[in-house]
Image (cartoon, rainbow, N blue to C red):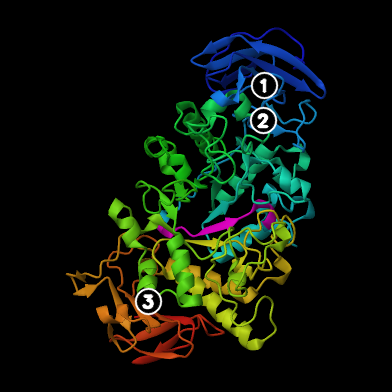
Amino acid sequence: MDGLSGGLLAAGRPWPLGSHWDGSGVNFALFSAHAERVELCLVDGQRTRVLPLHECTDQVWHGYLAGAGPGLRYAFRVHGRNAPAEGHRFDGRRLLLDPYAREVVGRFSWPAHDDPVHLLTAAVVDERFDWHDDAPPATPWSDTVLYEAHVKGMSRQHPGVPEVLRGSYAGLATPALIEHFQRLGVTAINLLPIHHFLDEQRLVNEGRVNYWGYNSLAFFAPEPRYAARIGGQSAIAEFKSMVRTLHAAGLEVILDVVFNHTAETDQWGPTLSFRGIDNRSYYRLPVDDLAGYENFSGCGNTVNLAHPRVLQLVMDSLRYWVEVMHVDGFRFDLAAALTRDSAFLPALRQDPVLQRVKLIAEPWDLGPDGYRLGRFLPGWSEWNDRFRDDVRAFWLTGEAGAGQLAQRLAGSSEIFQATGRPPQAGVNFITAHDGFTLRDLVSYQQKHNELNGEDNRDGHSHNCSWNCGEEGESHDPAVLERRRRVQRALLTTLLIAQGVPMLQGGDELGRSQAGNNNAYCQDNPMTWLDWRSADESLIDYVADLIALRRRFPQLRQQRWLTGETNTADACPDVTWWHPAGRPMRVSDWQSKKLAAFGLHLTASKEPRDGDALVADLLCLINRDEIPVSFLLPAGSWQQICDSNAEAAFASCQRERTTPVAARSIQILCR
């Protein structure tokens, strides 16, 4: 049947929400608590057919269209009071996108129009897909190494990816990139947002786009601009193929999701979906100003997860991406905003589908009491910005001492242990998409965001960075040597610390963004990975570090280090070592001059499956500008890593003492 012809809507049913094809027709269901009437609008080019949804059950408007099927484009018109002072912003003239849209058709353009040619519409989809024998890798948290990546930026300039696939879901799953991931030894690809998102009007007017994608509009639909569409394949099918291929290579897929706000922004933003469907239900409104929006996201609005139907929307979206799209977990942007007055955390904790996937919180937002690091429930991991800041401050600015670094190396137990969670509650990182790249962190003292069009006012100003003696690019051999040493020391610190390490994609290549620490609007070679200029020696160094972490189980403990004596052999699980050849004392930790110390990790007595070696580890750290000689604990010690050496992982025997080069880490095993 032509989607614009045929009979009236049958009653249908109020569940599931969204549009669902059953082989004979399509059921439509839309929640709106305050609507007076709702119309289903079938769209075909410039033609629109309007069908009233006469049935409303428990605030869900529904109907069934016999003979309709996949490919049918539709939107809704929702009628009600236009009374902003009461929180209502209905406008029955507007075509509105289904919040449960699986596929979004069209490309939104500014200024917003009301005609169907220029508005986004949903399409009915056929979810069938041949997953073959796909199974999630289910990598344990303790063995996980995260790799943060942008779908487009990863492959846009890769010479080994076919031109037609570059910048796409399919491009991310090509042999060239899988070979790189496997060479590194990472276990999970953490993708920046791939939910359908919009570019803000200000950026479009200035000739830029929202490259990072933290401006979601449709929580079920993959972003179509990342689809290569080879052979007419839909974005949904291409995404599924990507996941299937990455799984076959042993790689998990984790999505960065943005449920704290939507692309409709503040009261002056466009009405595209939620605002026109039921503004008062979907968004948090100030009790003393219902015409405005609570803005805990910094993006104009905050999604109201305190409302049961809005919470259902988020939970349904998460289950969809796990059950239908087969992803392995989520990183929640500004997750503190999701917990305000809502049952979001308990709902996730009891959900039989979601409790088996990886859940990562960015544990803050911009609202009151918005910094909530360490306050999420068991089963969650959190971005640990304390690790980022203290490690940077130790190696780059000298503002953090040995004691602060030791806390981070031990997994930040003072933050996470009290809630009964393991060391894997903390996701450790030195850099991420938001901020300097690793190379820029050691090349720039100040941010250089002029190309963003905000007079360098955007982005963080306190970066704990160090340019090693010259701002920006340098040809000074002494400056370049300092940068090489410090980058390796930072990476080594990340991979020997308890917790879950996260590497920013491109850091292993030596990627620079020319000092831009907020490149959210730069969709160009500044943010695309430059594979032709990749630092092969740095790639090898990172790969060898990850292999070393995998080799020694005490670098990925599932229990907290205690420093207590093991009753079997009178050896503590950890000893903090002074260069003079003794355990650290309280006075040592209190010293502001101490720039070198060691971490002695006793061999595990109960190695897990796959652990290849049981041996003591000694990590010797020297932040000083001169070499420091360490007196070693008793026994025969083999050096297995020297971050300063050209052949960093060449093995050699060490006697009673060993010199540790300036700004470096040495790792030995006994």
Q: Nearer the viewer, mark 3 or mark 1?
A: 1
Viewport quadrant of the C terminus: bottom left
Say what amino acid the circle numbered 2 marks: Thr
Q: Which mark is residue 271?
A: 2
First in sequence: mark 2 vs mark 3: 2
Q: Nearer the viewer, mark 2 or mark 3?
A: 2
- Tell me whether circle 3 and circle 1 mark residues in contact (CB < 8 Å): no
Q: Secondary structure at mark 1?
A: loop
Whole-angstrom CA distance, mark 2 to mark 1, is: 9 Å
Q: Residues within 10 Å of mark 2 (few under 14, many from 20)?
A: many
The structure residue drawn at horizontal position 58% and vertical position 75%, both measured from the top left corner, is 442
Residue 226 lies, in percent from the top left, at 70, 46
Say what amino acid the circle numbered 1 marks: Asp
Q: Residues within 10 Å of mark 3 (few under 14, many from 20)?
A: many
**151 within the magenta span:** yes
Residue 408 lies, in percent from the top left, at 39, 67
Say what amino acid the circle numbered 3 marks: Ala
First in sequence: mark 2 vs mark 1: 1
Q: Which mark is residue 402?
A: 3
**159 within the magenta span:** no
Residue 650 lies, in percent from the top left, at 50, 83
Up-down relation of residue 633 to residue 419 (above or below): below
Q: Which residues are magenta?
A: 142-153
* Quarter of the figure with residue 131: top right
Q: Residues within 10 Å of mark 1 (few under 14, many from 20)?
A: some
Left or right: 18 in relation to 228:
left
First in sequence: mark 3 vs mark 1: 1
Whole-angstrom CA distance, mark 2 to mark 3, is: 53 Å
Query: Does residue 24 appear in this view?
Result: no
